[in-house]
Amino acid sequence: MARQSERLLSLMQRLRLLHLPACYEQLADTAAQKEQPYLEFLENVLEAESQAKFERNVRLKTLWANFPFQKRLDQFDFAFQPSLDERKIRELASLRFLQNQENVILLGPPGVGKTHLAIALGLEAILQEQSTYFITVPELVAQLAQAQHENRLKEKMATFVKKAKLLILDEIGYLPVDSFAATCIFQIVSERYEHGSIVLTSNKSYGDWGEIFHDNALATAVLDRLLHHSHTINIKGDSYRLKEKRKAGLLAKTTAAPSPALVEEGKGSK
Ligand code: ADP
Ligand code: MG
């Protein structure tokens, strides 16, 4: 007959209680020392396993999400961006929009925090154990073209259509998209319509989308589905990257309207 510890370990393995082998003895010692009631001990054991499972799940989902950086809402300085309605952003962070399959569109010039806010919403979704996938539109276009070339477009599209409860499409409009990519984006938006949320960021206003897609009718069709159940956040302030450059003494404090070259230069300095 195996020893009790061996029997316990084998039961834990069978039940896939992966964290308990490392902590059950200590929990049992504490329970004995404190003369805990049996039910309290049982609750502590289940709680320890449940917490470890949650943390592992969050870790794996965060890895899968493909974020370029991790920034949370509490790292966002709302005082720097007065055009932004903090209450509205906090309401979005409650993720009701995700439950209701609504979209969030963050618009504004470079550096105002669109990607930061999109990632912060993604991290909140992951904390609620919702799968989230981040991709920039240029990267999406490149991946779709590659998948088409390798004859596995359907499989690739499924990642963007079905696998993620929340899809973050960053930077639509920085580069124009060709007609193949435009059709794929239309399909992604259509198939997610009323099934799964999209958080999208863009430096272009809706009126310019015909130009991005080289096709006014397609742009209208995409916007029609995207905007039907959606929240648009228009950020009108200054670039945070330039504020950091000013702080570092790289720009004169009086610089009112930075040259586009500086804005572009700032783009890489996350
Ligand atoms: P955008 O996507 O609008 O170009 P980002 O979200 O990439 O801008 O922001 C650029 C950098 O500045 C990021 O490191 C981001 O975390 C930071 N940032 C932008 N706005 C704020 C803010 N209001 N408070 C704190 N950090 C900010
Ligand atoms: Mg960005």
Image: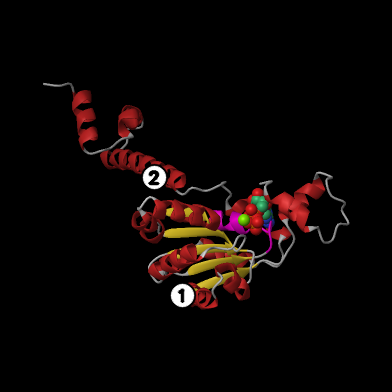
- Tell me the quadrant of ligand 2: bottom right
Can residue 49 be seen here? The reply is: yes
Residue lying at the far left of the rendered structure:
1
Q: Is residue 266 left or right of residue 189?
A: right
Residue 101 image offset from top left, x and y in percent = 42, 68
The relative height of residue 75 versus residue 39 in the rendered view (above or below) is below
Question: Are there few (<14), some (14-19), or many (20+) residues within 10 Å of tag 2?
Answer: some
Q: Residue tagged by mark 2?
A: 57
Instruction: Give the amino acid type for the residue marked by disc 2 in the picture.
Output: Asn
Q: Is residue 80 left or right of residue 183?
A: right
Instruction: Give the amino acid type for the residue marked by disc 1 in the picture.
Output: Arg
Beta carbon of the mark 2 residue lies under 8 A of ligand 1: no
Considering the numbered disc 2 on the image, is that residue within a helix, a strand or a loop? Answer: helix
The relative height of residue 126 versus residue 189 in the rendered view (above or below) is above
Q: Residue tagged by mark 1?
A: 225
Considering the numbered disc 1 on the image, is that residue within a helix, a strand or a loop? Answer: helix
Identify which residue, 95 or 195, lies in the foreground: 195
Identify which residue, 207 or 229, lies in the foreground: 207
Q: Give the quadrant of residue 32.
A: top left
The residue that appears at 42% across and 65% down in the rendered structure is 188
Q: CA distance from mark 1 to mark 2?
A: 32 Å
Magenta stretch: includes residue 247: no
Q: Which residues are magenta?
A: 109-120
Magenta stretch: includes residue 110: yes
Q: Give the quadrant of residue 100.
A: bottom left
The relative height of residue 13 versus residue 107 in the rendered view (above or below) is above
Identify which residue, 129 or 52, lies in the foreground: 129
